[in-house]
Image: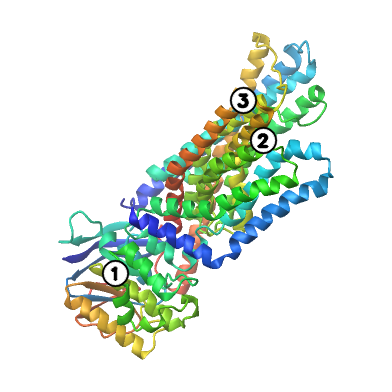
């Protein structure tokens, strides 16, 4: 399985953010998308996720499930955490587990991200870091081959970042792919870098 | 299909937890209807003649109150993006949320309507018909309203704009809802055709409105 | 769908601008001439109605205005369809330019209808079913204008307004049907604005006015579209200045 971007161009608000961008992410690899604010990192992730349409070029999955679109083979965790504040942590996880996946994975996901003890707390009471961890837990609930992460470590403390790195590396070991927009190196295994900005070039 | 009902159940759970919104909508309905006799004077004959119209118009206004937020919280906390990229087509997501809105707003208002009808001296033969027509017509309000909610998601002065956009689109439901009740009260044969057209409009909106709402949501998420 | 190249994207609007510039003087002159002739015929050669006298002559403005209010909405719906399905470069410009003009013709129809109805009804408004439908159409126009002006992002505003226009045109016949139903079943007597019988001496001024007002709309629409295209070009140039000044990526043209 391999994620491929072929001469991708994206235009937002009249500005061409990047043009003729080509890249590839093979199974077990991570791609770090780096660049200054406004360079198009989020736009690239959202284009891969299927929320945006590129102005030119295309992005596709080689060797994945033949009857599934790229959107169906990835999961995007953006800046907001998609948490319902009036539901408990467990209820949030259970909903996404049943909606996005096959259900039943919620307990394990909460444990991985250190939230099991907070299961019955309304999600609105969590700290920013805990909310971020709950948002990231969706990755385990959706269980897709390609993970798209937008500044995943924002609001996370050291322990939280380590938890994320462990989960990502486990995912990569299982043959998954990760594309992450970030300002700093995240400690993912086998990570290559893609720099956006005035010079858009593939690693 | 399971994902669809999961979403409906989630919206119902959130509405139940947050409780207050339903109360405000019902309270608004009561107050708006009560203002009429306060304004027009207690002429019971007059009130009973205008009761069907007032009860329906006030229902529309009360429903409009809660429609504005149909997609708003999901959009702001990022849930809408996840729902849009999930296994359920966006049209089904819009339909699920419209259905949940109907259950949490349309149905309670319909249940309250006959009680409020007492304030307007609605004739006895009108109560059953009122509930029947509102049950038949409120789905159209929730589903067509979802189109407006999707269009005004990020607009300035969204609430007022929503009312301006939606009221013309609600005219058919309003017309046939009121004319059904009116026909039943007069005992004419016009009740059956009016009522069936009302039902047809609701059914058509259940099928077609989510298409427009989803199209609007896709643009909003870009 | 791949973005058209720079030249392709501006070929259409540029050709349009040149075409419109050539057409406008002729269209304006033709409209003025037709309307002048039509009004002359209406006032001097057409007979007064045996019932309503000369007040019925307001229909020579009212009826074409009614036709135009519906025609313009259909045009907006067609433009919207062109935007949503074909991404035609001029579709959004056409829809945006037509909405205020359509609203004005609709308003004109309402005002002339109200003035026409006053001697008959004794009131300036009597919920005549046809006029009521036009009133709701007026609200639909206002909705289009209000929605577009409430959204900052112009491209998003165009797309969403297009959806509203298409939804509106689908529901419009149902609205018309429901208003007619209402007038039959709710009111004991149907008070319609009575059109005089169509006699050639009445038909010709009516047609001349209708064609004249349509050409007037065409001229106004072309002019408004040109203005909108110029405004968008100006905006693109201004944004280019901003981008160059801040050193960010070059704007897409």
Compare residues A176 and C149 and report the one nearer the observer.
A176
Q: Label 1's element?
A: loop
| In-image side of C248 versus C135 (left or right) | left
Query: Residue C212: which numbered mark, if any?
Result: 3
Separation of residues labelled 1 and 3 (CA atoms): 71 Å
At a point 60% along the width and 34% down the height, the residue shown is B176
Instruction: Answer with the quarter of the image where residue C139 lies.
Output: top right
Compare residues A86 and B148 and report the one nearer the observer.
A86
| In-image side of A116 versus C171 (left or right) | left
Q: Report if the CB atoms under discs 2 and 3 are less than 8 Å apart.
A: no
Residue highlighted by disc 1: A104
| Label 2, residues with CA under 10 Å away: few <14, some 14-19, many ≥20 | few
Give the vertical position of C10 relative to A153 (above or below).
Answer: above
Q: Foreground mark, 2 or 3?
A: 2
Chain of the residue displaying label 1: A
Q: Foreground mark, 1 or 3?
A: 1
Instruction: Answer with the quarter of the image where residue A96 lies.
Output: bottom left
Query: Residue B125: which numbered mark, if any?
Result: 2
């Amino acid at each position: 399985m391999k994620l491929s971007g072929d001469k991708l161009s994206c235009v937002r608000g009249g500005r061409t953010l990047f043009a003729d961008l080509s890249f590839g992410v093979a199974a077990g690899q991570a791609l770090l998308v780096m660049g200054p604010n406004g360079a198009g990192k989020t736009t690239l992730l959202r284009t891969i996720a299927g929320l945006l349409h590129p102005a030119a070029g295309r992005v596709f999955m080689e060797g994945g499930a033949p009857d599934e679109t790229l959107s169906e083979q990835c999961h995007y965790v953006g800046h907001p955490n998609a948490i319902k504040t009036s539901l408990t942590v467990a209820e949030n996880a259970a909903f996404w587990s049943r909606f996005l996946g096959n259900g039943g994975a919620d307990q394990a996901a909460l444990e991985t991200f250190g939230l099991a003890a907070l299961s019955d707390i309304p999600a609105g009471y969590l700290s920013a870091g805990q909310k971020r961890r709950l948002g990231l837990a969706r990755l385990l609930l959706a269980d897709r081959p390609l993970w798209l992460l937008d500044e995943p470590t924002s609001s996370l403390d050291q322990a939280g970042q380590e938890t994320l790195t462990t989960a990502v590396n486990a995912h990569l070991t299982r043959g998954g792919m990760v594309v992450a927009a970030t300002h700093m190196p995240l400690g993912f295994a086998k990570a290559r870098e893609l720099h956006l900005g005035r010079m858009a070039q593939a690693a | 299909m399971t994902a669809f009902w999961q979403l409906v159940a989630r919206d119902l759970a959130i509405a139940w937890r947050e409780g207050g919104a339903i109360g405000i909508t019902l309270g608004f309905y009561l107050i708006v209807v009560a203002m009429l006799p306060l304004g027009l004077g207690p002429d019971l004959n007059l009130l009973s003649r205008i009761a069907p119209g007032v009860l329906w118009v006030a229902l529309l206004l009360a429903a409009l109150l809660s429609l504005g937020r149909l997609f708003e919280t999901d959009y702001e906390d990022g849930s809408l993006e996840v729902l849009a990229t999930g296994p359920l087509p966006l049209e089904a997501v819009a339909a699920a949320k419209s259905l949940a809105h109907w259950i949490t707003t349309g149905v309670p208002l319909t249940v309250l309507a006959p009680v409020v009808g007492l304030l307007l001296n609605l004739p006895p033969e009108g109560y059953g018909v009122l509930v029947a027509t509102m049950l038949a017509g409120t789905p159209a309000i929730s589903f067509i309203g979802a189109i407006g909610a999707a269009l005004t998601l990020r607009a300035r002065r969204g609430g007022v704009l929503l009312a301006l956009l939606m009221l013309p689109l609600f005219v058919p439901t309003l017309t046939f809802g009121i004319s059904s009740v009116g026909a039943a009260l007069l005992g004419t044969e016009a009740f059956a055709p009016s009522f069936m057209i009302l039902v047809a409009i609701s059914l058509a909106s259940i099928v077609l409105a989510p298409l427009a709402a989803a199209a609007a949501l896709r643009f909003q998420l870009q | 769908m791949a973005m058209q190249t720079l030249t392709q994207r501006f070929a259409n609007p540029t050709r349009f601008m040149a075409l419109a510039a050539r057409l406008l003087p002729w269209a304006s002159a033709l409209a003025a001439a037709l309307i002048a002739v039509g009004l002359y015929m209406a006032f001097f050669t057409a007979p007064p109605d045996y019932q309503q006298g000369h007040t019925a002559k307001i229909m020579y403005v009212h009826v074409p205005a009614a036709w135009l209010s519906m025609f313009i909405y259909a045009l907006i719906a067609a433009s919207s369809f062109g935007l949503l399905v074909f991404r035609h470069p001029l579709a959004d410009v056409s829809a945006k330019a037509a909405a205020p003009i359509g609203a004005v013709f609709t308003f004109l129809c309402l005002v002339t209808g109200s003035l026409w109805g006053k001697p008959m009804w004794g009131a300036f408004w009597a919920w005549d079913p046809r006029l009521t439908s036009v009133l709701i159409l007026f609200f639909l126009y206002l909705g289009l204008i209000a929605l577009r002006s409430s959204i900052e992002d112009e491209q998003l505003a165009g797309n969403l307004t297009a959806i509203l226009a298409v939804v509106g045109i689908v529901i419009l016949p149902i609205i018309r049907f429901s208003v007619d139903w209402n007038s039959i079943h709710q009111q004991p007597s149907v008070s319609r604005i009575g059109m005089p019988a169509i006699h050639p001496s009445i038909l010709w001024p009516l047609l001349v006015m209708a064609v004249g007002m349509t050409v007037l709309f065409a001229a106004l629409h072309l002019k408004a579209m040109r203005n909108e295209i110029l405004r968008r070009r100006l905006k693109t140039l201004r944004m280019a200045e901003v981008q160059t000044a801040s050193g960010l990526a070059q704007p897409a043209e």
